[in-house]
């Protein structure tokens, strides 16, 4: 169960579920971006290429302000859903 935090933006629609025989938790966040059109416009101006071995597709780095905007809301979800008591960091 996700605890609503003051850091989680009010426009986010959050649901949780489980998958597999192990009942692994999954968090689904709809409406993360208040202005998705601006994010799409940014993406159209990027060069896409393989960035790291963890994902086989072509990617472009997300703008820094995007991560700065969503991480305060993501961290409580990680803590509450996955029991990450020491926080988390973006790896790539």
Image (spheres, rainbow, N blue to C red):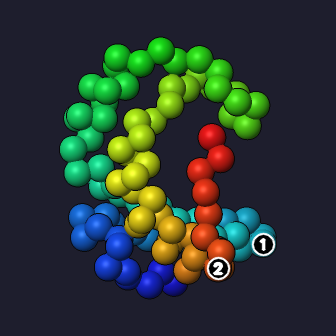
Q: Disc 2 marks which residue?
A: 85
Is any part of residue 18 visible from this angle? no
Q: Quick check: 71 above or below 23?
A: above
Horizontal relation, residue 14 to residue 34: left or right: right
Q: Secondary structure at mark 1?
A: loop
**Counting residues from the N terminus, which is met first, the one under dot 1 or under dot 2?**
1
Residue 87 place in picture, x, y as percent: 60, 70
Going 70% across and 30% down the picture, which residue do you hit? Answer: 52
Q: Marks 1 and 2, Cα distance to the nearest angstrom?
A: 21 Å
Residue at 29% x, 49% y: name it.
Answer: 33
Q: Is residue 51 visible?
A: yes
The residue nearer to you, when weighing 87 against 56, is: 87
> Residue 58, image x and y in percent?
59, 22
Please determine whether, in this image, residue 17 is positioned above or below residue 52: below
Nearer the observer: mark 1 or 2; the answer is 2
Disc tally is 2
Instruction: Place residue 23 in its image quadrant.
Output: bottom right
Are discs 1 and 2 less than 8 Å apart at CB?
A: no
Q: Residue at x 44, y 84 (%)?
A: 3
Query: Which residue is disc 1 drawn over?
Result: 22
Q: Position of residue 6 (x, y in %)?
A: 32, 79
Local SS, label 2: loop
Along the line of sight, the residue nearer the viewer: 53 or 67: 67
In the image, residue 69 lies at what x, y percent?
Answer: 35, 54
């Amino acid at each position: 169960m996700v605890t609503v935090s003051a850091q989680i933006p009010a426009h986010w629609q959050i649901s949780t579920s489980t998958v597999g025989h192990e009942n692994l938790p999954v968090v689904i966040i709809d409406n993360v971006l208040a202005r998705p059109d601006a994010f799409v416009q940014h993406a159209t101006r990027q060069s896409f290429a393989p960035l790291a071995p963890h994902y086989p597709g072509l990617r472009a780095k997300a703008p820094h302000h995007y991560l700065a905007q969503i991480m305060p809301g993501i961290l409580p979800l990680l803590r509450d859903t996955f029991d990450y008591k020491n926080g988390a960091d973006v790896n790539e």
